[in-house]
Image: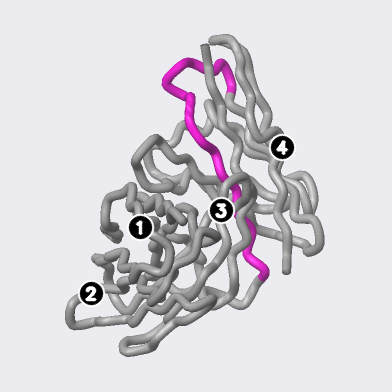
Amino acid sequence: GDSVTQMEGPVTLSEEAFLTINCTYTATGYPSLFWYVQYPGEGLQLLLKATKADDKGSNKGFEATYRKETTSFHLEKGSVQVSDSAVYFCALISNFGNEKLTFGTGTRLTIIP
Amino acid sequence: GAVVSQHPSRVICKSGTSVKIECRSLDFQATTMFWYRQFPKQSLMLMATSNEGSKATYEQGVEKDKFLINHASLTLSTLTVTSAHPEDSSFYICSAPTGGGPDGELFFGEGSRLTVL
């Protein structure tokens, strides 16, 4: 079945550090890939997505590139801020039309000033 | 953007009682809503798909008599955990798609943390 494997947290970085959160997946066909973010006290929000190989999703300074050859969708940001502290979830949809997401376990990120 | 709201955000109940969690789409209509469950340090697991006007579709291994889902209107789905036990303690999250197939955006509620004593 479909699965998403995420880098285990928690991750603690200093402000302005470079961030990478690894995500790899197993899926049939050609999945769409997503990163969701959950800020404290709020629901999950879509951060970025990519729907086909070599696509790069980007938003709020975060980027992730859909790598079919390595089945990966790593999240990166060049310079993190305290406001980026949140839980980040990698996810995929493998079957078009049913909109069912398969999630990774989530990675808690804490940025210290 | 679209908003999905869950209530309550936290609930503590005694073993054997039933608990109802509401999921509302505040500014759009949702014919479908999804209910997820998350255990500590684990993925969000899809429990069921709630369909307005028809029965919910449950994922394999999810007891439909234990987790009652009612999609009463285009803006409200409820999850009732019946005869709750401590092992039902978890974080329950709902989501609703705004349409557009797999490329459409899913909006999530804030989640409801259930603790069964």
Element under disc 2: loop
Where residue B77 sits, quadrant-wise, is top right
Do marks 3 and 4 both belong to one polypeptide chain?
Answer: no
Q: Is residue B89 magenta?
A: yes
Query: Which of the 4 image quadrants contains residue A50?
Result: bottom left
Q: Which mark is residue A71?
A: 2
What SS does tag 1 mark? strand
Q: Tell whether B106 sits left or right of B77.
A: left
**Pointer 4 residue:** B7
User: Which residue lies at the image location 67% right of the left edge and 49% below the top edge?
Assistant: B54
Q: Amino acid at mark 2?
A: Thr
Q: Residue furthest front?
A: A113
The residue identified by callout 3 is A39
Q: Position of residue A91 (x, y in %)?
A: 40, 63
Residue A13: assigned label: 1
- Disc 4 crowd rating (10 Å Cα; few below 14, some 14-19, many 20+) is some
User: Is A8 on the left-hand or right-hand side of B72?
Assistant: left
Report in which chain the residue with disc 4 lies: B
Q: Are marks 3 and 1 in contact (CB under 8 Å)?
A: no
Residue A53, image x, y percentages: 32, 87
Identified by mark 3, the residue type is: Tyr
